[in-house]
Image (cartoon, rainbow, N blue to C red):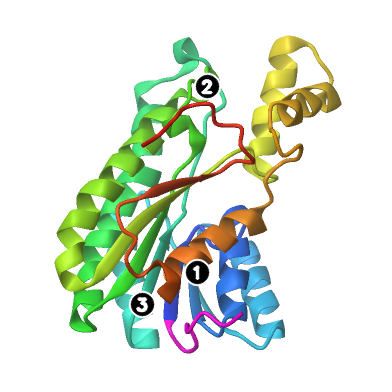
């Protein structure tokens, strides 16, 4: 299936690993020119190489999105190198697997800066570029902790709830420019960060890692962990013409594990 994305430009933050990497590869396979950013040059180079091997085009940028200076430089360089930004996928993330009494102000502040504030800042800078072209797509990667209680992921919950709220608020503002803004909430996804969560849970409970993973999978009606490619497929949908009249929405890709009814 073709999604009419050939030669358009996608900027993906945190695009060298996990979900971001899967999104970058998926959009590249649809003929998009890819720009990824991350903090580690080695993983950036590997993902750029893999995209090139598919016949795609990828520019990579080393940046720390918790710093406004890095964000401003990133958006400026991507625009200069590619000529435009048609799609923004806000995906950069950090995580603290800890209970409330272990979390410091700095950990809360850093998580807010890396994810929520970075999403806000990059969207603010990218919107004028999209407005010039009378349209664009912004997809924010949130997380199911926006909807559930997770004792070892309180900073995630606070930040992801903010991402969901920002998505709705900004969607209304950006609509006049022909820009849609949506959010994907991943459930337990087979990434390095989720592995760290499972490791901490095993430490807390005294169970083996296999027991922890088995318990989590048992809570997923579809009976398996979400794969990064599953999240990438949802992002692709939001970027495609099929979603041209969808904005301000948050969709969970969680295998059915979310028990909340969200209207």
Residue 235 location, x and y as percent? 50, 61
Classify residue 163 as left or right of residue 187.
left
The answer to whether the residue labelled 3 contacts the one labelled 1, judged by CB atoms less than 8 Å apart, is no
Question: For the magenta stretch, what is the residue range?
Answer: 1-8
Q: Does the magenta stretch include residue 2?
A: yes
At 43% from the left and 84% from the top, the residue drawn is 8
In the rendered image, residue 12, in percent from the top left (x then y), is placed at 47, 65
Whether the residues at callouts 2 and 1 have beta carbons within 8 Å, the answer is: no
Q: Which mark is residue 86?
A: 3
Secondary structure beneath disc 2? loop
Residue nearest the viewer, comparing 152 with 227: 227
State whether residue 137 is above or below residue 7: above
> Could you tell me which quadrant the N terminus lies in?
bottom right
The secondary structure type at the circle numbered 1 is: strand
Query: Callout 3: helix, strand or loop?
Result: loop
171 displayed left or right of 107: left
> Nearer the N terminus, badge 2 or badge 1?
1
Q: Which residue is drawn at 55% across and 74% down?
A: 27
Left or right for 95, reference 163? right
Residue 212 sits inside the magenta stretch: no
Q: Residue at x 21, y 80 (%)?
A: 134
* First of labels 2, 3 by sequence position: 3
The front one of 192 and 189 is 189
What is the CA distance from the residue labelled 2 to the residue labelled 1?
30 Å
| Picture residue at 48% right of the left edge, 40% below the top | 143
Q: Against 178, is 184 above or below?
A: above
């Amino acid at each position: 299936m073709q999604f009419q994305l050939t030669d358009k430009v996608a900027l993906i933050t945190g695009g060298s690993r996990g979900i971001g990497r899967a999104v970058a590869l998926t959009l590249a396979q649809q003929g998009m020119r890819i720009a990824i950013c991350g903090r580690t040059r080695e993983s950036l180079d590997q993902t750029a190489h893999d995209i090139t091997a598919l016949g795609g085009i990828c520019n990579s940028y080393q940046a720390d999105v918790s710093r406004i200076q890095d964000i401003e430089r990133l958006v400026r360089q991507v625009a200069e190198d590619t000529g435009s930004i048609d799609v923004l996928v806000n995906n950069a993330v950090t995580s603290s697997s800890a209970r409330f009494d272990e979390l410091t102000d700095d950990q809360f502040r850093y998580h807010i800066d890396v994810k929520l504030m970075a999403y806000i800042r990059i969207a603010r800078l990218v919107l004028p570029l999209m407005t010039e072209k009378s349209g664009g797509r912004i997809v924010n990667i949130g997380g199911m902790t926006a909807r559930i209680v997770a004792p070892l992921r309180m900073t995630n919950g606070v930040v992801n709830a903010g991402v969901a709220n920002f998505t709705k608020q900004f969607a209304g503002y950006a609509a006049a420019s022909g820009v849609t803004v949506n959010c994907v909430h991943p459930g337990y996804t087979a990434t390095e960060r989720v592995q760290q969560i499972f490791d901490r849970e095993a430490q807390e409970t005294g169970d083996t890692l296999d027991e922890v993973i088995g318990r989590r999978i048992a809570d997923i009606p579809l009976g398996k962990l979400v794969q990064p490619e599953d999240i990438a497929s949802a992002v692709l949908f939001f970027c495609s013409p099929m979603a041209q009249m969808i904005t301000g929405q948050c969709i969970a890709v969680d295998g059915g594990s979310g028990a909340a009814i969200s209207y």
